[in-house]
Amino acid sequence: MISEPKTEYRNELHYVAIRSRGKQNEIPQLLPPLIPGLFNWLKLNKISPSGAPFFRYLQMDGENMEVEVGIPVDKQINGFENIQPGSFPAGKYLEVTYTGPYSNLPLVHSELAEWKKKNNMKVKNGVTEFYPTDPDAEPDSRKWKTIIMTQVED
């Protein structure tokens, strides 16, 4: 199930992230294991997360990709080693919420791409998937929520 796309202005959102490179078919093995390390680093540094973990797709070239696995925080902070600070710039964002298994996300992205094309929306800064549902706490994948967000030109 996909919500109706909506656009809204958002303020800058800071985060900490680990950057990773790999192939699309490696996502389930490569990226989710990085999330607990980020939460542990935040806890050790007494920093509270301010939102759900995310994958920010920075570059996709065929099957190859560069992704940031991140967690939002309230303010800009210093990173350490492979954990680096970043931010989503203030601006207009397009957002949809998908409910269901992660295996359907490529179809959701295709449908969203068609919607953007039909509505003459130009994307800036890649696409991000936020994961507000913890699969360990909710075993029913039909209930998993994914918020897909991308900055668009005004």
Image (cartoon, rainbow, N blue to C red):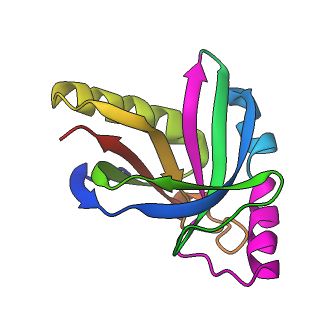
Q: Quadrant of residue 24?
A: top right
Tell whether 94 sits left or right of 97: left
Q: Is residue 37 visible in this depiction of the protein?
A: yes
The image shows residue 21 at horizontal and vertical percentages of 74, 32
Task: Identify which residue is drawn at 18% across, 26% down.
Answer: 118
Task: Identify which residue is drawn at 29% across, 27% down.
Answer: 114
Residue 55 on the magenta segment = yes
Q: Is residue 149 above or below residue 152?
A: below
Q: Is residue 53 visible in this depiction of the protein?
A: no
Task: Identify which residue is drawn at 34% across, 44% down.
Answer: 151
Q: Quadrant of residue 66?
A: top right
Q: Is residue 111 above or below residue 47?
A: above
Taking depth in this image into account, of 132 and 123 the one nearest to the observer is 123
In what quadrant of the picture does the C terminus appear? top left
Residue 37 on the magenta segment = yes
Q: Residue furthest bottom?
A: 46
Taking depth in this image into account, of 42 and 33 the one nearest to the observer is 42
Tell whether 12 sits left or right of 10: right
Taking depth in this image into account, of 8 and 14 the one nearest to the observer is 14
Q: Quadrant of residue 47?
A: bottom right
Magenta-tinted stretch: 33-61
The image shows residue 100 at horizontal and vertical percentages of 51, 54
Tell whether 118 sits left or right of 62: left
The image shows residue 56 at horizontal and vertical percentages of 56, 45
Task: Identify which residue is drawn at 67% across, 55% down.
Answer: 17
